[in-house]
Amino acid sequence: MIADFGLRIADWEARVDQDVLKKRTKQFALRVIHLTESLPAGKTADVIGRQLLRSGTSVAANYRAACRAKSPADFIAKMGIVEEETDESVYWMELLVEAGIVKESLLQPLMQEANELLAITVASINTAKKRKTKQ
């Protein structure tokens, strides 16, 4: 009985963490949208901006899909997509800076958030893999 209660607390804590991460990934997507809308006109900024818009908004969409995974393997696969899209978003932001399109100081907070989301995603994947092998 006590063990069952502990499991329910763990489930509740996981749900709270999940809700927080859903909000963070959605806010990240919105920030990416605002960034791409504010890029200067130009062919390079347009191409990189479109790529960033796709990957940055995909992070939240794919995280939501992972939250509805049908199995641990499905969760791991979907979180792998979140990892790829987050890392790709960092890459496009680095290109914006290195191409001289956006000042690094302006992108630093968004890049920091992307790196934090990436670290959380990788940790979640690793935890899920460990749990899967224990089963």
Image (cartoon, grey):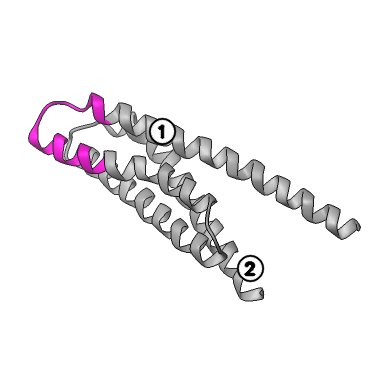
- Whether the magenta-drawn stretch holds residue 87 is answered as no
In percent of width and height, residue 65 lies at 47, 50
Q: Residue furthest right?
A: 1
Q: Looking at the image, which residue is at 54% across and 50% down?
A: 67
Q: Is residue 52 left or right of residue 16?
A: left
Q: Earlier in the sequence, mark 2 or mark 1?
A: 1
Q: Give the residue pinned by disc 2.
A: 131
- Whether the magenta-drawn stretch holds residue 44 is answered as yes
Q: Callout 1, which amino acid?
A: Pro
Give neighbour class at mark 1: few <14, some 14-19, many 20+ (Cα, 10 Å): few
The span picked out in magenta is 36-52
* 84 to 103, vertically: above or below: below
Name the one closer to the observer, 47 or 65: 65
Q: Give the residue pinned by disc 1.
A: 109
Badge nearest the viewer, 2 or 1? 2
Q: CA distance from mark 2 to mark 1?
A: 33 Å
**Tag 1 secondary structure:** helix
Q: Looking at the image, which residue is at 23% across and 31% down?
A: 102
Q: Looking at the image, which residue is at 71% across and 51% down?
A: 11
In percent of width and height, residue 19 lies at 59, 39
* 65 to 109, vertically: above or below: below
Q: Is residue 48 left or right of residue 58?
A: left
